[in-house]
């Protein structure tokens, strides 16, 4: 009995140690990036790996925010993220609900088509031709509509709907509840954990829109934040920062600009996670274990 308790305690210690190490491996790079973005030129150049700057400087942020295009680009990304996530959630749930019910006659055919798109895709050129033929080029909708439903997320939602008892649906029908009313008044409230999970997935996907924006958006005034920040990094690497573009600072290392860009592109979407954390684990688990 004593040996068993010792073994359990040893397992707990080893497990906690490994988890702490993995957490540090994950957190330390973030600390390095954020600290480097706030470091002064002298502080950054004097250290090979910076965790806590001794001299704070906002010159890198002044440089990237010196352009009037950045607030506009940030607003575009927020619009794409919010509207795109809402549309994706609406289409995904409306598509997943009938596919989760045995009484839907074309369920197997539709599921085959969904899974087929996960294995075989048309590619970049057919996607571009479809978007062009729909007249969506240089439109924000080109970043929302073509990826409104992601097959993998759809399957997660289908599996979650399958966990809702059919008897609940039959009882609602006996009380005169129609399909749409039952979907919005019963199924959606019961599916909040899965919906919260998909909200985070879709929001991150829309926030990180980059390649599609390069392909479909030719107007630089309509660039989302990721594309504009890439342009800022390229300009800083070309030596524009070294010309004293920020008042009071004759030289800003391009590396600090990179770190500031990463911070600006990452922190806003990270702030969404705490509001969805209590639903995230449950929604991801339940939606993935039952097929």
Image (spheres, helix red, strand yellow):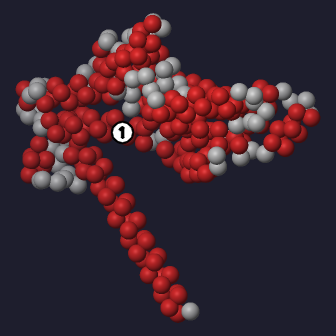
Residue 237 placed where, x, y %? 13, 30
| 144 vs 260: above or below | above
Q: Quadrant of the N terminus?
A: bottom right
Residue 162 placed where, x, y %? 71, 43
| 173 vs 228: above or below | below
Front-most of 25 and 261? Answer: 25
Name the residue: 86% across, 38% down.
170
Name the residue: 53% across, 25% down.
148
| Picture quadrant where residue 90 is located | top right
Residue 34 placed where, x, y %? 27, 46
Front-most of 238 and 159? Answer: 159
Q: Residues within 10 Å of mark 1 (few under 14, many from 20)?
A: some
Name the residue: 42% across, 42% down.
270
Q: Is residue 264 visible?
A: yes
Q: What is the count of numbered marks? A: 1
For label 1, the SS is helix
Residue furthest out toward the bottom: 2
Residue 29 placed where, x, y %? 28, 51
| Picture quadrant where residue 186 is located | top right
In the image: residue 62, left or right of residue 22: left
Q: Is residue 193 visible?
A: no
Judging by the rendered image, the residue that carries numbered circle 1 is 266
Front-most of 63 and 261? Answer: 261
């Amino acid at each position: 009995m004593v040996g068993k308790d010792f073994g359990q305690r040893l397992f707990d210690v080893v497990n906690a140690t490994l988890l702490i190490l993995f957490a540090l491996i994950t957190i330390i790079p973030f600390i390095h990036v954020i600290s480097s973005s706030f470091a002064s030129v002298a502080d950054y150049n004097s250290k090979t790996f910076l965790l806590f700057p001794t001299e704070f400087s906002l010159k890198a942020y002044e440089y990237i925010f010196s352009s009037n295009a950045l607030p506009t680009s940030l607003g575009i990304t927020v619009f794409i993220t919010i509207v795109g996530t809402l549309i994706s959630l609406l289409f995904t749930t409306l598509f997943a609900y009938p596919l989760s019910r045995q009484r839907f006659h074309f369920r197997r055919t539709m599921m085959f088509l969904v899974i087929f798109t996960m294995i075989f895709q048309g590619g970049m050129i057919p996607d571009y031709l479809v978007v062009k033929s729909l007249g969506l080029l240089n439109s924000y909708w080109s970043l929302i509509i073509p990826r409104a439903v992601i097959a993998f997320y759809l399957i997660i939602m289908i599996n979650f709907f399958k966990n809702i008892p059919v008897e609940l649906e039959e009882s609602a029908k006996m009380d005169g509840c129609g399909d749409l009313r039952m979907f919005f008044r019963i199924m959606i409230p019961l599916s909040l954990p899965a919906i919260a999970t998909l909200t985070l997935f879709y929001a991150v996907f829309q926030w990180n829109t980059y390649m599609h924006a390069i392909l479909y958006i030719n107007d630089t005034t309509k660039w989302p934040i990721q594309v504009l920040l890439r342009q800022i990094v390229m300009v800083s690497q070309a030596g524009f920062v070294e010309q004293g573009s920020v008042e009071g600072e004759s030289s800003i290392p391009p590396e600090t600009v990179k770190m500031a860009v990463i911070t600006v592109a990452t922190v806003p979407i990270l702030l969404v996670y705490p509001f969805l954390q209590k639903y995230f684990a449950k929604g991801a688990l339940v939606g993935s274990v039952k097929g």
